[in-house]
Amino acid sequence: MAAHIGHRLRKGATSGVVVAAAVAALAASQAPEAVSPPTDNTGGDRAIGAGDSTAPPSGEGSATGDSPYYTELPPLNTPNKPGASTNLPVITGPAEAGIPASVLAAYKRAEQSIRSTTPGCNLPWQLLAGIGKVESGQARGGRVDANGTTLSPILGPVLNGVGFADISDTDGGAYDGDKVHDRAVGPMQFIPSTWATWGQDANSDGKKDPNNIYDAAQAAGLYLCANDRNLALKADLDRAILSYNRSTEYLNLVMTWVTYYQRGTHQVPDGTGVLPVDRSDGLTPGNLPTAPPSPNPTTPAPVTPKPKPSETRPGQVKPPTVPTKPPVTPPTATPAAKVTRLTIVANGKPTTTTGSAFTGAPRVAALDATGKPVAGVGVRFEIVGTTDSHFAGGAKAVTVTTNSSGLAASPTLWAGERTGTFTVRATVVGRTLAAADFAATVTERRADTLVRVGEDALSATTGATFTQQIKVKATDKGALAPGVLVTAQIVTSETDPKESAEGPYFKQGGEVVRTVTLTTGVDGLLTLAPDTVLAGDKAGTYYLRLTAPGGGVVFIALKVEAPSTPPPTQEPTPDPTPSGTGSPEATASPSASPTT
């Protein structure tokens, strides 16, 4: 087999059969699996179904508007052996195997940032590299300036419905220079409407630029992690890639590059990478779309030429030449060094109920000595105290970078099942400054109303069980109240809350109990199955008293009856007639005649 598979796949050659065959060949020569074994797979792999809630976040259904992509496959010969270091020196070599230095740095920075804020996503930088290779040939071979911005805009075709999606202009031409239709923009090929939602300022220059590889890589990573995806799971990884471009061929192609980069790669100098040749729309480097003129062109100011010094006139002394000293550049202070205090901006006392998300995120502002905000500062949010509450993904601490307004907000904070108070503490990374503390409180879920569903009388005989189902609906402020802890107790009176010492009972762990704790379901209903309540041995009327935090209470009558007594058996009446008389009537004995 040649050293390269389908080095120039044409549009018609990108069918599933061809790509599948190429993937199989690549896998046979390189690695058995395209996905690293997950470190935590407690959730199990999930299948992609029609009812999947992880639909692409973009309004158009994909990050790129399903724009075309480069179809070139990686070479069969990997640059390194499995497990080799990826922190390799800048070298030359097969450019299609290497990644330009600034582009690789942007991918790794995005991975590190997202793993600190959303560790449950398990984003690998190789996924960003695979998508970047397919979307733009690693920013057109790393043709970026010192800040990571492409030397010229990278634009997809006009999305006017002719061979592509039909997406009307959403940005007034600000990013793509087109005020009629949208075009995918930048090294990660975001359409403007998606960039408006996911755009980032990862290099802290005060703007979110889709043509900057650092900004674009960070945005792509967050987009791929959307909807609580865990990219260590094959199903979630597939969903993420398909949310970028809804094509099975695209998914397979990206995964071949992810596999390739996971086995090792090397850096190449910026600008020396090789741009792939063929794309899924059949275009080649010679007929790629060019950048339109800027929507707001500016005319450079005219430069007045400096007159040459005239010759020294006779008798005139030429002034001595004063040597010019090079300007002294003062050392640049890090953003964190400028911060003198953190101040709480929002949600100083977050409160929620067990198992729920806190409304609003703890937010701080990093300020300098004059009170001005400082951008690009690392702020660490940490949960302090005894609690099972956590940030998204189960993390107890995350680091967030302040935006251009000096603001940093924590990721979503989730309450566990433990009630009580704890502290969310915000500190400046690398500085010893006073912390900003948020007092968080977790309370029990509440229900202000409990109502029995159904009105059938509940009765049982002594020694038996109540065979009827008991169902109660819990609501709080008119809304169904799921997950509420309800206390169920057997009492003898609706006015006396004391637990009964006899009558009906529950069995718990083989023991007789008359008070148990139950939980309402996701529909707000509490259901006691038939035979859950036993009648006991003493007849009478008892009550099942149900109470919930929040004031909900309901009494349900339980009638215990003694078994009915059958009528006594009647003995037969004896026959008074002497045997052999043949007459039912009594016969008087003849009296003796008196002696005369």
Image: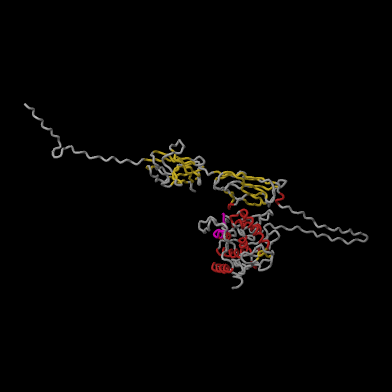
For this view, does 303 lie left or right of residue 6?
A: right
For this view, does 592 lie left or right of residue 556?
A: left
Residue projecting furthest to the left: 596
Start-end of magenta stretch: 227-237
- x, y (%) of residue 532? 43, 46
Decide which of 494, 141 is in the foreground and name it: 494
Quarter location, residue 231? bottom right
For this view, does 238 lie left or right of residue 296?
A: left
Decide which of 206, 400 is in the foreground and name it: 400
Res 13 seen here: no
Decide which of 88, 452 is in the foreground and name it: 88
Q: Overall secondary structure of the magenta stretch?
A: loop
Residue name at image x 78 percent, y 59 percent? 303
Based on the picture, tell me whether residue 527 belongs to the magenta stretch: no
Q: Residue 109, relative to residue 6: is it above or below?
A: above
For this view, does 57 lie left or right of residue 312?
A: left
- x, y (%) of residue 5? 59, 70
Residue projecting furthest to the bottom: 1
Residue projecting furthest to the top: 596
Based on the picture, tell me whether residue 232 belongs to the magenta stretch: yes
- x, y (%) of residue 274? 66, 67
Decide which of 117, 315 is in the foreground and name it: 117
- x, y (%) of residue 110? 64, 57
The quadrant the C terminus occupies is top left
Res 323 seen here: yes
Q: Residue 69, relative to residue 435: is it above or below?
A: below
Residue projecting furthest to the right: 315
The quadrant the N terminus occupies is bottom right
